Each structure stands twice: as structure tokens, then as C-alpha cells.
Amino acid sequence: MTTELTVEETAQVRLWHRVSQFLFREARLLDEWRLLEWYDEMLTGDIRYSVPATDVRGEVADALGLIDDDAARLRQRIEQLLNGEVWCENPRSRTNRMIGNVEILTDRGTHLDVAANVVVHRFGHGRSDAYVGKCRFELVVEGESFRIRRRVVVLDHETLYEHGKLSIIL
């Protein structure tokens, strides 16, 4: 017995595929250190990129985070990374991201709330580290593609002692 997808289900599968391809491209640009291209082509002008503290669980709005960048601060972070001003990224680390369990949580018409799991492997300076966590995105619909308005990476680590400084863009 074959089961055919309804028109609505087919549209959902296509949307999920477009979102997944967008996130895979984002991962590739970050891994290739094409940070300016990532910033200019994939983010909105009011981007918010945050990484909450690893020891805070739940929704704690006033908790101090590891990273909480607006567009200007994120651009500054990128320029510092690319210009060799971040000593622990000179020479640059090599990274390899694995994105999985991509799920569209809510389709609000003008934007999507998306969840995904991520593992970022970082290699450099005689070390290898793995950052494991969950990403939450607010993707603004732009034609057949998207732009990221909000990007939150919630790490599953209790501490980052073994990893040292968080110097890459997760």
C-alpha cells in the first residue's frame, strides 16, 4: 500500500528541506571562515547571537551569558577574528560542524522558529574540542531563502574548563 503526501504535507517537506539546506550552508560558511559573507548574506540587520552560560538551565532572562551580541558587536567580533586580533585564534582553528534534528517549531508566516542540534569540533593549537548543544533560530522569510534574526546556542556542557576560551562562532 502506498501513501501519497497531501499538498500541505508536501509543502511542509519542501519548507523543511529549504530550512535544512540554509542551515547546512551556514555551517559551511562558518567552517570555511567566510565570516563576512555569513554576516552579510545570512543575517538580518537586527541580529541577536547569544550563548547562555553553561551552568544556567531553564528560562532565566537576566542570567549572565557567555555571548550576547547585537549586530554591531557581532561585526566587531568577526573583524577581530579575521584580522588576527584574537590571540587564541591565530592561527585560526579548524572547525567541523554537524547539524541534525532540524525541526520547524512554528511557522509564523513572516518568520520561522527553528530548532536543531549541533556539534562543533574545533581543532588547533594541539587541541581538539567538541561543543555539543542545541540551536534555536528565528529565520525571517526572504523570498525562497531566509535570514537569521535570532541565533541562540545552548551548550550541553556543565562547564567549559576543558575547552578554555570560547573564541569561535558556534
Image (cartoon, rainbow, N blue to C red):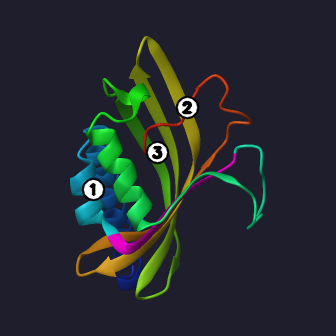
Q: Residue at x 35, y 84 (%)?
A: 7
> Mark 1 or mark 3, which is nearer the start of the sequence?
1
Residue 25: give its label. Answer: none
Residue tagged 3: 170
Is residue 60 shown above or below 5?
Answer: above
Q: Which mark is residue 165?
A: 2
In the displayed structure, does residue 135 sit left or right of residue 109?
A: right
Q: Quadrant of residue 20?
A: bottom left
Other residues around mark 3 within 10 Å, as few (<14) / some (14–19) / many (≥20):
many
Residue 26 appears in the rendering: yes
Classified by dominant secondary structure, the portion drawn in magenta counts as strand
| Dot placed on the residue nearer the N-terminal end, 3 or 2 | 2
Is label 3 in a helix, a strand or a loop? loop
**Magenta segment: does it hold 116?**
no
Q: Position of residue 125 (x, y in %)?
A: 41, 15
Q: Secondary structure at mark 1?
A: helix
Q: Nearer the viewer, mark 3 or mark 2?
A: 2
- Where the N terminus falls, by quadrant? bottom left
Where is residue 99 drawn, in percent x and y? 44, 46
Name the residue tied to disc 1: 38
The amino acid type, in three-letter code, at marker 3 is: Leu
Q: Residue at 36%, 65% (x, y): give it.
A: 19
Numbered range of the magenta stretch: 44-53
Work out how far the residue at label 3 is from the one at label 1, CA to CA, in angstroms: 13 Å
Q: Residue furthest bottom?
A: 109
